Image (cartoon, rainbow, N blue to C red):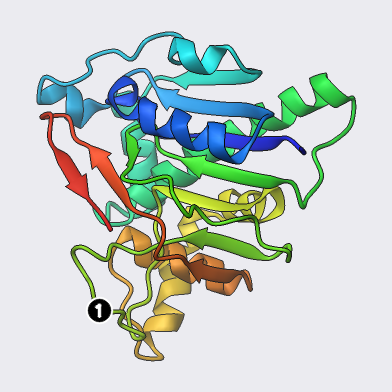
Amino acid sequence: MAPLVILYSTAYRQWEKALPTQLELFNKITDDPMFGIHYWTTVPWLQQMGYYAFAPSQPPEAIRKWPYKHTITDQTKEFYETIARVVGYKKLVLPVAYFLFSTKIALENAEALWRERYGTEMPDDQPVLRIRPDLKFETTDNFPVIPTSNNYYVSNWNRLHRPTWNPNAPEVGDVMCLTTKRIIKDLVNFNPENLEALTEKYRARGRDVWFSEQYLWTILEENGVDVIQDENIHLSIETCDGGLNKLC
């Protein structure tokens, strides 16, 4: 079976708690996973609430049994202010910038690991599964197979909170996707400084674009990517207060 590249990005929070369902999925869909990982040493707003003052220096032990390369970044006040300046201090755009920044580093780690293992560059059509560390799979049954095309972004939308699809406000999940290296690379190379100008073009056509999942859809649409919403994907987020935020 061909290797599956798995990217982890954004905050470390609740990784150990969410990990069992992630491992269950990995064992079902691949016998050769390799991991590119990036997470923050601290997340200021979580730290202020008393959660996860400092993330561990290594990913969970269960991940380290497979090939992996990881990077940890300090998320200082200066870093936050830099990101905020880039996106104009728009609160609902900030998660997009964080996602793009973190996932870019995770992909770079995966590419470096690929070169170490195979002595070549990772192919553009290499399948990639990208997830957040705090993501829980409510079920791993009927998880989507890798599409035969090379232009796919398989995910979901938040069906629990917005059960009816709104064609005037399309959105796609930013906590997990099944896609290819090329699409991830195009996505993370998008300059967040251009995000508002891009979305204004779509808003002028009557589109609602106001939160991160809608921004993400807009970038993918602009890049000509086929977004596939798969209702067999059922996800939750393990929250810092010990609860679950079900998404679909």
Apparent side of residue 9 relative to residue 220 in the rendered image (left or right) = left
Apparent side of residue 47 relative to residue 170 in the rendered image (left or right) = left
Nearest the viewer among 138 and 85 is 138
Evaluate whether residue 7 shows in this view: no
Q: Residue at x 47, y 19 (%)?
A: 72
Measured along the vertical axis of the image, is residue 222 above or below residue 243? below
**Residue 203 position in % (x across, y down):** 37, 83
Q: Residue furthest right?
A: 119
Apparent side of residue 84 relative to residue 140 in the rendered image (left or right) = left
Residue wearing tag 1: 164
Residue 16: quarter of image:
top left
Measured along the vertical axis of the image, is residue 126 above or below residue 78? below
Q: Residue furthest bottom?
A: 205
Measured along the vertical axis of the image, is residue 65 above or below residue 86? above
Q: Amino acid at mark 1?
A: Thr
Residue 190: quarter of image:
bottom right
Nearest the viewer among 137 and 72 is 137
Q: Residue at x 38, y 33 (%)?
A: 21
Evaluate whether residue 29 shows in this view: yes
**Residue 71 position in % (x across, y down):** 53, 20
Nearest the viewer among 219 and 167 is 167
Placement of the C terminus among the 4 image quadrants: bottom left
**Residue 6 position in % (x across, y down):** 58, 35
